[in-house]
Image: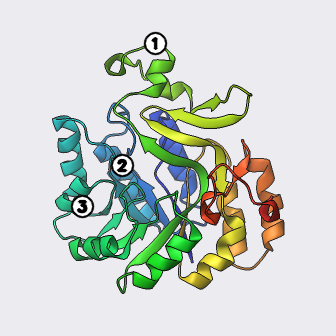
């Protein structure tokens, strides 16, 4: 099984992003996704910047995919999407069906934000050129196994296994609302929150994380205890979502687990220092996403 590094879902300073990927070049990840998925106002990294980082990662032996924005709201968003889709060098991760169409039959990755819930959808995506699909994060193992039985031949399967879960998008910006600012004059407040803003329930329990127009889980989705099972049912790639700190260390633990160098229990213990919030794995087991199975605690 391979390890992928998903796109950065937060708004980080340009030099922070570049330093992050300079370090990622030496991490035990096989595939790196680059690009802005959440909000077009996050513009510190241009397409040329992403392409420059991409070439550096290719030189380090990584496969690079350019991720597209999940919610297209304007003509300028569409123009940016076209520029990404029409690059002649790298495949794209399509995060909406518009990006699928703009891929023009070229190989692409069907991202986790495309509603892929049945075999017929997989077949349609494969006909359009999808070489890989990323399971939507709220799916269970049971549903995944059913889809794998109906998956077109030669189509890879990728599962999001670590990080705050990307749950939903909105035309509203929740971070701007937090500061009583309009979306079009948000003053780029996201950059002050490198892992989002944790939202607690009235009882004080961390529940969600606000990340601009994206809603995430507050808990850290962690499926390291399920890697052997994933391998057996046919998962090809596991995805780690970038976090402000310790992403490289997390990738090292996952690599050791996949290589059989440590047990699941040892891997869980090794990851504990890097969890900045409570872990969860409920969706995988067909339960509420916020839940954590006792055997993996």
Q: Are marks 3 and 1 in contact (CB under 8 Å)?
A: no
Q: Are marks 1 and 2 in contact (CB under 8 Å)?
A: no
Identify the residue under disc 3. Answer: 100
- Left or right: where 194 falls relative to 37: right
Classify mark 1: helix, strand or loop: loop
Q: Earlier in the sequence, mark 3 or mark 2?
A: 2
Residue at (35%, 45%) from the top-left corner?
A: 49
Foreground disc of the pair 3, 2: 3
Q: Is residue 280 above or below residue 172?
A: below
Question: Which label is found at residue 50?
Answer: 2
The extreme top residue here reads 180
Please name whichever residue, 260 or 179, is drawn nearer the observer in this view of the structure. Answer: 179
Please name whichever residue, 37 or 256, is drawn nearer the observer in this view of the structure. Answer: 37
- Left or right: where 155 falls relative to 159: left
Number of numbered tags placed on the structure image: 3
Rounded to the nearest angstrom, the CA distance separating label 3 from label 1 is 36 Å
Identify the residue under disc 1. Answer: 180
* Disc 2 residue crowd, few under 14, some 14–19, many 20+, Cα 10 Å: some
């Amino acid at each position: 099984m391979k390890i992928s590094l998903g796109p950065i879902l937060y708004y980080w300073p340009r030099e922070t992003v570049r330093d992050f990927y300079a370090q990622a070049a030496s991490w035990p990840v096989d595939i790196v996704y680059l690009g802005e998925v959440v909000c077009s106002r996050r513009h510190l990294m241009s397409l040329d910047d992403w392409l420059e980082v991409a070439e550096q990662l290719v030189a380090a032996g990584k496969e690079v995919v350019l991720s597209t924005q999940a919610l297209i709201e304007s003509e300028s968003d569409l123009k940016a999407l076209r520029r990404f889709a029409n690059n002649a060098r790298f495949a794209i991760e399509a995060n909406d069906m518009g990006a699928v169409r703009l891929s023009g039959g070229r190989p692409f990755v069907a991202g986790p934000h495309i509603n892929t819930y049945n075999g017929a959808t997989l077949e349609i995506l494969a006909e359009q050129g999808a070489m890989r699909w990323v399971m939507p994060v709220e799916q269970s193992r049971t549903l995944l196994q059913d889809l794998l039985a109906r998956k077109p031949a030669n189509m890879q399967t990728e599962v999001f296994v670590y990080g705050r879960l990307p749950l939903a998008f909105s035309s509203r910006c929740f971070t701007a609302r937090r500061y009583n600012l309009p979306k079009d004059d948000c003053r780029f407040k996201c950059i002050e929150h490198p892992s989002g803003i944790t939202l607690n329930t009235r009882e004080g329990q961390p529940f969600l994380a606000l990340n601009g127009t994206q809603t995430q889980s507050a808990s850290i989705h962690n499926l390291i205890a399920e890697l052997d099972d994933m391998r057996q049912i046919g998962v090809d790639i596991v995805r780690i979502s970038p976090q402000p700190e310790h992403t490289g260390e997390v990738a090292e633990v996952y690599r050791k687990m996949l290589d059989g160098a440590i047990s699941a229990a040892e891997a869980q213990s090794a990851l504990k220092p890097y969890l900045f919030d409570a872990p969860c794995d409920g969706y995988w087991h067909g339960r509420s996403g916020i839940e954590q199975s006792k055997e993996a605690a």
